Image (tube, grey):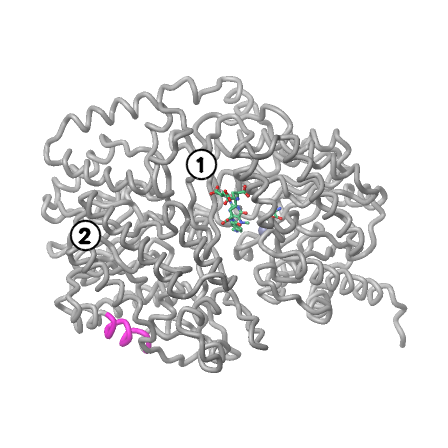
């Protein structure tokens, strides 16, 4: 049985790539220095996989920013607005064009916006959305793929397996950006010849296998999309017949697309048997004799040790039908979504550490499974003992927590009065102007703030010194907000390392790692906490900081919490009970914090749920069940307070049009939502749906240092005013400001307050006939 890997984390075990990229962007290191760091990471990863005994090592899974953006460069899908970056400035090379597309370009008198970024399926990874125009032409533009293939061959002395995103998925991942309507899938005719040229070039370089990822095969497909798959792979087969194509699917089962997928003329099909173990029977039964099946049995999305007996049962089932020779073993998906190496986690309790596997350990699991299939029973027994110790551990089961969650009633998830009543009570209480202004919570997490935490960890600062510094940062952020004239203030979240990890560190049932970094987008990483057992709140988590902040000002201070679905979604979740059960336990913990904030005098409380859309199952039919428990979890967290307490929620990074009804059911008094990059497109959906509660459509994109003008924001507010009742509108940025720097933050917020002021004047001006 051939083993292979679908992709390895590229940030480096110590986030070397993050650090080098940020240094390069700041102009502190040269291009060659950045490239050297990247080369070292690639070499390390390849050799590690070779040492772990992985049969086929992937290449081109390395990326300086994002693998979808790499594809756009490979096939020359560069929007024309970036032409000056590549042509007018002599010192710029391909990497500068690449970063300009990812991050925007504000140098040499140019002001070019970045490409859009959105969620990669149901993960916390974000990709750069390809932009397409009608009749667009493609051509091979970048050599990265070929260089990395040759480099990997040299380093490992083996023939690597290049990884590409398939032509159909690549088109489906993108967006039409043209004044005339067209269907991006129609671009396949122009795109496919370039893919074929790429494959031929790989073949000329000595490639034997190529992994082509087509994750859209696990989603609901239209007839036209299905035909696109058939056309693409027939053509590839016709023109590159000698190359072995391994078609990779992941994150769901193939379901009704099984017949389509197994009949595409490729040599191997990879299936995700962690998300959809049941699909193995149907897939191996339907697989024609020419097709090998790659069994994705090791979870690429979580950190728990593989249960070898379960995996073995799947492998044996497949083997009984198609024989061992036609089987391959692999992780369920790319290991991009796993932290790099468990070995560095010296602070984890030894028993618990023994329950886990990070990317490096997952490679060993693949290898061990291969040995077990070959008859090694010792490995199997050793693994069974570990799995058993976790299953029965008293460290993870808390009867009182289970009992409280089991006793949840519908009334616990419902506010006392309906929204219109609450709105009146809150208006009387707060006396806010029309178009009240606020921000989403975080202010710049500067190097100095991060250094404070690093010093605290090292013992260079006492807890008291640390808190005093954070207090100073909070006071200064409050003064800035007062001077700018914002109506509802925030404390700035300076005490938080991350909006999920911070809560994970304080909740019982969670564990956290020292170095379990996972790429979120570009150079930005997150360290997802681990939900190992039943979750409960052991004391106040945020009250100290919110109460302190409220004491510093006469204005309203918004309390700031992360919602239960987002905490669930952005953590490594226990896999021994359904996700909804864990979500309800977290919801009760957050509910207690909301009530504690209210008791401490906080009148406005925001419960962020940016990940609620991301958790939506990939198949439409599975959506309603998820949304029902996800919305209930949010409501549970929000419904313990009086009518007079205003609950906000916040969402970003996703397309929400298709879950509008459920957003309304969350019944937050105010929702602040990312809308600026789509030019308020989303608000049309809110308007169509007659969204009943108050809403703050983001008026500026916080992902770029660019300061938006008053006019731009006024224009967006006019659009909003035309769509929704003025009395329900708030004014705010798209998301938190933690990734920004202070100068641009202050300038942008000043303009935002001015735009709100103008909107107010316009709304209250007498109409002249
Ligand atoms: C809103 N977003 C978030 C998502 N997921 C989350 N879990 N959190 C989010 O906020 N998903 C969707 C989006 C994604 N957006 C972002 C935006 C920004 C970041 C980010 O800036 N990440 C930071 C890491 C944040 C963090 O945990 N910082 C810690 C640790 C700081 C650190 O690096 N310490 C060093 C030691 C330093 C020294 O010794 O000098 C270390 O531990 O090695 C902290 O502030 O304490 C990033 O740097 O990438 C992520 C997602
Ligand atoms: N309150 C958080 C939300 C991010 S989605 C912040 O402002 O960073
Ligand atoms: Zn946000």
Quarter of the picture holding the N terminus: top left
Question: How far across and down, in percent of the image, does residue 108 sit?
Answer: 56, 76
The dominant secondary structure in magenta is helix
Reading the chain from its start, which is encountered first: label 1 or label 2?
2
Q: Which residues are magenta?
A: 190-198
Comparing 329 with 252, the one in front is: 329
Q: State left or right for residue 246 relative to residue 220.
A: left
Mark 1 CB near ligand 1 (8 Å cut): yes
Quarter of the picture holding the C terminus: bottom right
Comparing 723 with 402, the one in front is: 402
Q: Looking at the image, which residue is at 65% across and 34% down?
A: 465
Image-quadrant location for residue 226: bottom left
Examine the structure image and report whether residue 191 is included in the region drawn in magenta. Answer: yes
Numbered mark located on residue 514 in the image = 1
Give the CA separation, mark 1 to mark 2. 31 Å
Residue of label 2: 56
Label 1 sits on a secondary structure element that is loop
Mark 2 residue crowding within 10 angstroms, few (<14) / some (14–19) / many (20+) = many
Comparing 243 with 352, the one in front is: 352
Q: Residue furthest front?
A: 460
Examine the structure image and report whether residue 85 is included in the region drawn in magenta. Answer: no
Question: How far across and down, in percent of the image, does residue 552 sit?
Answer: 79, 40
The reply to whether residue 412 is in sight is no
């Amino acid at each position: 049985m051939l083993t292979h890997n679908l992709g390895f984390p590229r940030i480096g075990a110590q986030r070397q790539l993050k650090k080098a990229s940020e240094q390069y962007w700041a102009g502190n290191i040269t291009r060659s220095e950045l490239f050297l760091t990247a080369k070292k990471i690639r070499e390390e990863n390849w050799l590690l996989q070779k040492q772990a005994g992985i049969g086929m090592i992937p290449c081109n899974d390395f990326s300086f920013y994002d693998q979808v953006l790499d594809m756009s460069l490979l096939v020359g899908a560069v929007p024309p607005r970036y032409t000056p970056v590549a042509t007018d400035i002599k010192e710029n090379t391909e990497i500068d064009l690449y970063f300009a597309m990812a991050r925007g370009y504000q140098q040499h008198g140019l002001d070019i916006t970045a490409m859009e970024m959105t969620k990669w399926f149901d993960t916390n990874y974000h990709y750069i959305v390809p932009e397409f125009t009608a009749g667009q032409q493609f051509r091979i533009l970048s050599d990265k793929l070929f260089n990395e293939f040759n480099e990997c061959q040299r380093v490992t002395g083996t023939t690597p397996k290049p990884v590409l995103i398939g032509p159909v998925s690549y088109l489906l991942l993108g967006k039409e950006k043209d004044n005339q309507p067209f269907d991006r899938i129609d671009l396949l005719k122009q795109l496919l010849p370039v893919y074929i040229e790429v494959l031929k070039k790989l073949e000329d370089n000595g490639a034997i296998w190529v992994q082509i990822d087509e994750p859209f095969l696990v989603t609901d497909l239209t007839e036209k999309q299905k035909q696109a798959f058939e056309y693409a792979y027939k053509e590839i087969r016709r023109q590159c017949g000698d190359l072995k194509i391994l078609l990779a699917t992941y994150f769901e089962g193939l379901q009704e697309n099984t017949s389509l997928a197994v009949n595409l003329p490729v040599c191997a099909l990879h299936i995700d048997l962690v998300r959809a173990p049941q699909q193995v029977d149907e897939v191996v039964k339907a697989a024609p004799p020419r097709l090998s099946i790659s069994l994705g049995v090791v979870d690429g999305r979580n950190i728990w040790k593989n249960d070898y007996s379960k995996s073995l049962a799947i492998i044996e089932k497949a083997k009984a039908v198609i024989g061992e020779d036609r089987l391959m073993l692999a992780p369920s998906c790319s290991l991009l979504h796993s932290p790099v190496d468990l070995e560095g986690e010296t602070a984890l309790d030894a028993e618990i550490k023994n329950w886990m596997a990070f990317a490096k350990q997952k490679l060993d699991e693949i290898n061990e499974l291969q040995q077990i299939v070959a008859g090694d029973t010792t490995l199997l027994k050793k693994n069974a003992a570990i799995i058993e110790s976790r299953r029965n551990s008293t460290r993870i089961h808390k009867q009182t927590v289970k009992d409280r969650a089991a006793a949840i009633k519908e009334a616990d998830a419902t506010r006392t009065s309906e929204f219109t009543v609450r709105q009146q009570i809150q208006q009387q209480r707060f006396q806010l102007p029309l178009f009240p202004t606020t921000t989403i919570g975080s202010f710049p997490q500067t190097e100095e703030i991060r250094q404070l935490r690093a010093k605290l960890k090292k013992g260079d600062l006492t807890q008291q010194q640390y808190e005093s510094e954070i207090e100073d940062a909070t006071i200064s952020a409050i003064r800035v907000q007062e001077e700018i004239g914002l109506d509802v203030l925030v404390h700035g979240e300076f005490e938080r390392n991350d909006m999920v990890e911070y809560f994970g560190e304080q909740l019982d049932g969670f564990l956290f790692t020292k170095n379990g970094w996972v790429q979120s987008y570009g150079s930005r990483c997150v360290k997802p906490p681990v939900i190992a057992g039943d979750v409960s709140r052991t004391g106040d988590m945020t009250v100290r900081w919110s109460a302190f902040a409220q004491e510093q000002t006469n204005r309203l201070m918004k309390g700031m919490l992360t919602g239960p679905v987002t905490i669930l979604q952005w953590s490594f979740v226990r896999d021994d009970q359904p996700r909804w059960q864990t979500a309800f336990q977290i919801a009760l913990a957050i509910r207690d914090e909301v009530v504690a904030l209210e008791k401490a005098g906080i009148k406005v409380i925001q419960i962020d749920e940016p990940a609620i859309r991301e958790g939506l199952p990939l198949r439409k039919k599975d959506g309603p069940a998820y949304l029902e428990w996800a919305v209930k979890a949010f409501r549970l967290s929000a419904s313990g307070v009086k009518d007079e307490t205003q609950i906000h929620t916040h969402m970003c990074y996703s397309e929400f049009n298709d879950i509008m009804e459920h957003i309304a059911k969350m019944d937050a008094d105010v929702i602040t939502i990312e809308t600026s990059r789509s030019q308020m497109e989303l608000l049309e959906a809110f308007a169509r749906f007659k969204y009943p509660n108050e809403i703050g459509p983001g008026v500026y994109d916080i992902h770029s240092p660019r300061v938006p003008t008053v006019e731009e924001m006024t224009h967006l507010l006019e659009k909003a005013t035309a769509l929704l009742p003025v009395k329900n509108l708030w004014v705010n940025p798209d998301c938190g400001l933690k990734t920004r720097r202070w100068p641009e933050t202050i300038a942008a917020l000043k303009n935002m307050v001015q735009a709100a002021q103008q909107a107010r004047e316009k709304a209250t001006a007498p109409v002249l006939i």
